[in-house]
Amino acid sequence: MKRTLLVINKSSGSVGEVDFEELTSAFQTAGFSLEHIVELPRDELPHRADVEKMAVDVVATLSGDGTVASVCSRLKGWGGALLVLPGGTMNLLSRRLYGEQSIPGLLQSLGQAQQEPRHVSVIETAQGEVFTGLIAGPSTRWGEVRESIRHLDLAEMVEKVPEAWAATTTSDSVRVEGLEGGYPAIFVEPLDNGNLCVRAFRADGLGDMLSHGMAWLRRDFRNGPHDDLGEMRAVDIIDDGDAEIGLLLDGEQASGQSPFRCVAGRSSVKFITIAGAQEQAGLASRLQG
């Protein structure tokens, strides 16, 4: 049995719908013994030293992608492995690692398959590692609208929609160094082949603007109107009109300095994967994209 610490973020996605008695049983059946539980936001995220004192083999997360990134930042260099359960809204990292699975289905698969702890491709930035992708540019203001909807704050949503619309249509655009053209947003995603996939989102007219905004509100911004700029090992994103660039890092609001550099790298912690599942999930993602 693998000694396991479970990190739960009860404000993420569908975590509140989970039956924890059934979850504990599913962990046990899959070969993981739950020794400790950290519940956010009540508890603080553990640091590497804390986890090492607990002598656990696995840190499992039941949360969104942003929380997973925070856990990884705290555990940098740890010798154990992370297990990413689909507990958030988009679950991009869990889907990337294991494909589209429910929590019970994933744990059952892990119990029956060959488990393979390994490092995964990430984007290395000045703000740390990014696991599922980042967006840079004025269109990141739509992320504030999305958060208003998630928290059911209608008053804030009414305020944020015009601000996001204005930022996308009137603010300075961002560009990739060495390439022509400016855009309201540039999306960078780590690929399993070790490269970065770079896409630039358009808002040339009313139709593009509506499609762009709706893609954000559906929480799947990658489906907005865009140009594929190709695969790169490193990319510098520049805002010629402002020293600061709006960012979304693994879905979390942030900001950075122009030029904002992204470099293909490998994660500083290992993740539990199912042998062969990552390649299948990555292929499905590319076919859908």
Image (spheres, rainbow, N blue to C red):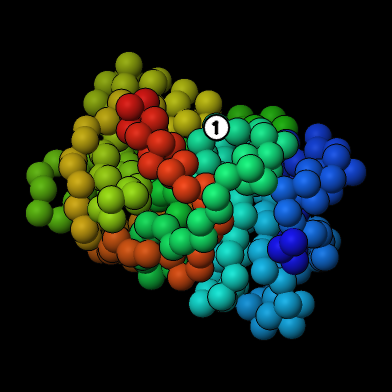
Residue 43: x and y in percent read 81, 65
Q: Is residue 141 visible?
A: no
Q: Which residue is at 39% across, 30% downward?
A: 284
Residue nearest the observer in this picture, 130 or 214: 130
Residue kind at label 1, given as amino acid type: Glu
Residue 146: x and y in percent read 57, 36
Q: Which residue is at 67% across, 46% downward?
A: 111
In the rendered view, tell whether residue 266 sits above or below residue 141: below
Residue 120: x and y in percent read 42, 58
Q: Quadrant of the N terminus?
A: bottom right
Question: Pointer 1: what residue?
Answer: 100
Alpha-carbon neighbours of circle 1 within 10 Å: few (<14), some, or many (≥20)? some
Secondary structure under tag 1 reads: loop
Q: Which residue is at 59% across, 70% downward?
A: 80
Residue nearest the observer in this picture, 9 or 206: 9
Q: Is residue 42 visible?
A: yes
Extreme residue in the right direction: 21
* Residue 272 as seen in the image, left or right of residue 36: left
Displayed quadrant of residue 243: bottom left
